[in-house]
Image: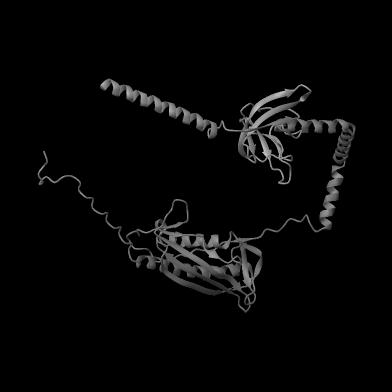
């Protein structure tokens, strides 16, 4: 009985193998790439470099078949005949464009089929498709043809080019012989148009930082204050010294400038004022890798000399805000001051601006440090939750 059972199992196994083989063959015929295909002949009028049997056939970029044969036409030696096999549903029409496309820089070539109008006739199976004369031309051949055309143009116009080069050489020699006269003519033109004069040096002015500030506490502060470049309107973001002859009107002070744009000078003098007060280790400008405990944001509102009345008056105003690490505003204040000018020239105007600005810088340093000192301390991080003890308790009886 055991022997007969063993033979029955072997028979069932062989029957399963045969059924699986038939199923695999059926899959290959219908789904695995050996199904029904429609064949066409494609005639190329030139080289098809890179095209091989088995190369892909693409219709609008989608693979629809492959090249099944390549050969030469004995009656037309300049032509290459390629046989392609594509899916039966591929809409190949009489106006479908045919070409060859290289797959990447080092990949093989593929036959490309593009478009075709819906009203054109469908090409029947085993039909003949004709590619354009430039279909098999690669970029190297196109470059060689272009260079050949350039060479032909140069050869046809060699005498004219030689004559033009000779004339240019003659003109250059004439300019070299008369260089002194040309320099004189150019100098005369400059004098006629008002050019040629050396522009006068424009004096540059700088702002003054605050001094004689209250000393910090004996114990060095533990915080770090970062001062970004102040924000302001476009009219103040300049190196020009501004005058206000009337309300709402602004002009430039002639023949005088700041040594840099006003926001840059403002930021530098704020930091220098903190350093003069003894906070050199607690103040910094915005730099990569620097993360402060607080930020001092400044918005410049006014920074000009009002000349509407006598004497002229320097007018400086800005808003300052202190932010903590979370971006929360812990203090904000508006600063404004005026100072009279003792004259009407650039030096006296700048001196008046310095007086008003230095006064506000002193107030800014005192207010900022007091605001930071009175700020509530940052909350301590929450303690980590206790880790559950996964070890078995020694008081519990151990299983054998």
User: Foreground residue, 79 or 250?
Assistant: 79
Q: Image point 50% across, 68% down: which residue?
A: 358
Residue in the image at 50% along x and 32% along y: 27
Question: Residue 113 at x, y = what percent?
Answer: 68, 38
x and y percentages locating residue 196 in the rendered image: 78, 54
Above or below, 197 against 342 in this view is above
The quadrant of the image that shows the C terminus is top left
Relative to 137, 231 lies left or right: left
Residue nearest the viewer, comparing 154 with 168:
154
Look at the picture and state if 197 lies above or below 176: below
Which quadrant of the structure image shows residue 172?
A: top right
Quick check: can you spot residue 222? yes
Colour mode?
Answer: one colour
The spot of residue 298 in percent (x, y) is: 49, 65
Q: Position of residue 232 (x, y in %)?
A: 55, 66
Quick check: 325 above or below 35? below
Question: Visible in this render: residue 104?
Answer: no
| Side of 283 relative to 131 (left or right) | left
Give the quadrant of the N terminus: top left
Q: Quadrant of residue 64?
A: top right
368 and 53: which is toward the camera: 53
């Amino acid at each position: 009985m055991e022997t007969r059972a063993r033979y029955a199992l072997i028979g069932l196994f062989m029957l399963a193998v045969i059924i699986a083989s038939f199923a695999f063959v059926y899959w290959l015929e219908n789904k695995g790439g050996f199904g029904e295909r429609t064949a066409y002949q494609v005639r190329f009028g030139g080289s098809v470099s890179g095209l091989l049997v088995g190369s892909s056939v693409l219709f609008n970029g989608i693979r629809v078949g492959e090249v099944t044969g390549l050969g030469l036409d004995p009656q037309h030696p300049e032509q290459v005949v390629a046989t392609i096999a594509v899916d039966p549903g591929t809409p190949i029409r009489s106006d479908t464009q045919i070409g060859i496309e290289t797959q990447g820089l080092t990949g093989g070539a593929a036959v490309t089929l593009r478009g075709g109008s819906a009203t054109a006739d469908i090409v029947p199976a085993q039909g003949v498709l004709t590619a354009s004369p430039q279909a098999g031309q690669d970029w190297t051949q196109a470059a060689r043809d272009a260079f050949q055309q350039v060479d032909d143009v140069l050869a046809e116009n060699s005498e004219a080019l030689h004559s033009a080069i000779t004339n240019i050489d003659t003109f250059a020699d004439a300019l070299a012989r008369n260089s002194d006269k040309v320099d004189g003519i150019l100098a005369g033109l400059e004098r006629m148009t008002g050019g040629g004069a050396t522009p006068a040096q424009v004096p540059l002015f700088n702002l003054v930082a605050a001094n004689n500030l209250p000393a910090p506490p004996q114990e060095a502060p533990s915080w770090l204050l970062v001062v970004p470049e102040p924000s302001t309107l476009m009219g103040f973001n300049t190196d020009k010294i501004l005058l206000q002859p009337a309300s709402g009107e602004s002009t430039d002070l002639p023949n005088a400038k700041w040594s840099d744009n006003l926001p840059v000078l403002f930021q530098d003098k704020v930091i220098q004022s903190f350093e003069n007060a003894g906070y050199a280790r607690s103040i910094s400008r915005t730099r990569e890798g620097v993360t402060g405990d607080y930020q001092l944001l400044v918005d410049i509102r006014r920074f000009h000399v009002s000349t509407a009345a006598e004497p002229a008056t320097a007018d400086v105003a800005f808003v300052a805000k202190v932010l903590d690490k979370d971006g929360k505003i812990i203090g904000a204040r508006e600063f404004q001051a005026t100072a009279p000018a003792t004259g009407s020239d650039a030096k006296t105007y700048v001196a008046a601006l310095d007086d008003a600005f230095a006064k506000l810088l002193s107030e800014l340093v005192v207010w900022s440090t007091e605001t930071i000192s009175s700020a509530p301390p940052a909350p301590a991080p929450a303690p980590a939750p206790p880790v559950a003890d996964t070890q078995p308790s020694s008081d519990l009886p151990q299983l054998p």
